[in-house]
Amino acid sequence: MQEVHDFLKEAKTYFLATMDGDQPRVRPFGTIDLFEGKLYIQTGKSKDVYKQIEANPKVEISACVGPKWVRVEATLETDDRVEAKKHMLDEYPNLRGMYDENDPNTAVLFLKDAKATFASLTGEPSRTVEF
């Protein structure tokens, strides 16, 4: 899990894929946080992406750093605790203009049943970790 966190932090931007009915939707994200042994992302509950995750919590995340890339399959689960929201926002203080840990719109979600595949465009063998 730490390796996935570090890779996504280094990438700065990763892409999150959800399903909107039968239409895949992919968008850039930039928040990743380790809290209480879980890997978290953040969004707003009023956004379409959150509604898509509520309807189908299975997602994929993908990011590249140079020729190396990772793809993470996971199920997202919302954590409505103020502590989890505060930890995320303390990691990304620039989001505090839009979000607050006491705002019911702020959503932090953790990855569960996750499988990360690390690979490279240079032909290195891929490897998978689960958490």
Image: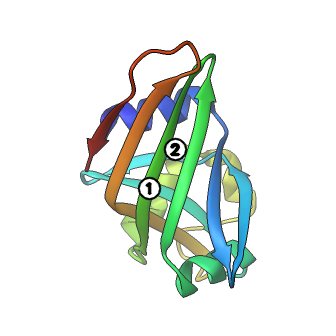
Q: Secondary structure at mark 1?
A: strand
Question: Residue 33: horizontal and vertical position, in percent?
Answer: 44, 47
Q: Residue type at mark 2?
A: Glu
Q: Residue 112 sits in which quadrant?
A: bottom left
Q: Residues within 10 Å of mark 1 (few under 14, many from 20)?
A: some
Disc 2 to disc 1, how far (Cα)?
24 Å
Question: Residue 117: horizontal and vertical position, in percent?
Answer: 41, 38
**Residue identified by numbered label 2:** 91
Name above or below for residue 123 compared with residue 37. Answer: above
Q: Residue 36 sits in which quadrant?
A: bottom left
Name the quarter where the N terminus is drawn.
top left
Q: Residue type at mark 1?
A: Glu
Name above or below for residue 124 compared with residue 86. Answer: above
The residue lying at 70 percent from left, 46 percent from top is 94
Q: Considering depth in this image, is 31 or 115 the residue closer to the camera?
A: 115
Residue 113 shown left or right of residue 71 in the figure: left
Q: Secondary structure at mark 2?
A: helix
User: Which numbered circle lies on residue 73?
Assistant: 1
User: Which numbered circle lies on residue 29?
Assistant: none
Q: Nearer the viewer, mark 2 or mark 1?
A: 1
The residue lying at 71 percent from left, 82 percent from top is 46
Name above or below for residue 83 compared with residue 27. Answer: below
